[in-house]
Image (cartoon, grey):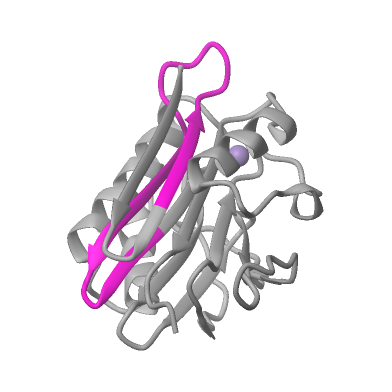
């Protein structure tokens, strides 16, 4: 089953595609987009392996993030790590949008890739982007040193998070004029490996025009 979602919270528009590996009812990839004043918490989670146990670990991480989403990213990661000991473990990337300061702070443990595309000035859409620095580790087993990075954001900037069920190389092929859900579906259609659970999550900052 493929789950697609398009929604808007605060000044963020987002879309997602989530698909379990064929033959599995439960998806080991999970995500969260949740208001967290003054902005939102965004998470893309990949439980190790696939199937029920991967899904259980990923859903536990998601539930913890949903409950404590107001905490700083480092606290959230430490909290999830402790709770996930004894499970399959997960890798995940988190982004904390602060819409008052117009910043996005992100942190990645494992291999959930992230890219922040800058909209450029006015309608002049560019392909310049920041790549999330991923540090090796697995929540529930071993954490790397946690170093969140903060980037300024402007209206039209677009965050894309993908699990390792998605091939790389899509960055230069994107039409960033598309809505987040259309972008997520484009990436899924053209870059999903089909050999793992698959998650594509796209979040755009639409407010705050200068
Ligand atoms: Mn995976």
| Point 54% across, 58% down: residue | 138
Q: Quadrant of residue 27?
A: top left
Q: In which quarter of the image is residue 121?
A: bottom right
Q: Does the magenta stretch include residue 63?
A: no
Q: In which quarter of the image is residue 79?
A: bottom left
Question: Does residue 77 appear in this view?
Answer: yes
| Point 54% across, 11% down: residue | 23
Position of residue 179 relative to residue 116, above or below, is: above
* Residue 83 image offset from top left, x and y in percent: 30, 57
Q: What stretch is highlighted in magenta?
A: 14-42
Compared across the picture, whether 63 is left or right of 86 comes to left
Residue at the limit of the structure toward the left, as seen here? 67
Question: Does residue 46 appear in this view?
Answer: no
Front-lying residue, 62 or 89: 62
Position of residue 94 relative to residue 2, above or below, is: below
* Residue 173 image offset from top left, x and y in percent: 79, 48
Residue at the limit of the structure toward the top, as seen here? 23
- Please identify the dominant SS of the magenta region: strand
| Point 47% across, 56% down: residue | 203
Q: Is residue 33 magenta?
A: yes
| Point 40% across, 46% down: residue | 31
Residue at the limit of the structure toward the front, as seen here? 123
Count of marks placed on residues: 0
Front-lying residue, 125 or 51: 125
* Residue 155 image offset from top left, x and y in percent: 48, 72
Compared across the picture, whether 54 is left or right of 76 comes to right
Residue at the limit of the structure toward the bottom, as seen here? 101
- Quadrant containing the C terminus in the rendered view: bottom left
| Ligand 1 visible in quadrant | top right
* Residue 44 image offset from top left, x and y in percent: 47, 52
């Amino acid at each position: 089953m493929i789950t697609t979602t398009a929604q808007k919270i605060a000044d963020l528009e987002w879309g997602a595609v989530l698909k379990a590996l064929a033959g599995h009812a439960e998806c080991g990839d999970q995500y969260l987009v949740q208001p967290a004043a003054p902005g939102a918490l965004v998470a893309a989670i990949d439980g190790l392996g696939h199937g029920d146990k991967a899904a259980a670990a990923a859903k536990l991480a998601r539930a913890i993030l949903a409950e404590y989403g107001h905490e700083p990213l480092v606290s959230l990661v430490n909290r999830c790590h402790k709770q996930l000991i004894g499970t399959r473990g997960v890798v995940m990337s988190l982004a904390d949008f602060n819409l008052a300061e117009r910043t996005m702070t992100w942190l990645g443990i494992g291999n959930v890739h992230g890219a922040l595309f800058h909209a450029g000035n006015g309608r002049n859409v560019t392909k310049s982007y920041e790549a999330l620095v991923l540090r090796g580790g697995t929540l529930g087993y071993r954490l790397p040193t946690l170093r969140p990075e903060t980037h300024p954001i402007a209206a039209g900037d677009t965050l894309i998070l993908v699990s390792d069920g998605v091939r790389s190389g899509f960055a230069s092929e994107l039409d960033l004029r598309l809505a987040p859900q259309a972008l997520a579906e484009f990436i899924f259609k053209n870059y999903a490996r089909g050999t793992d659970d698959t998650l594509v999550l796209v979040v755009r900052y639409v407010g705050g025009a200068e």
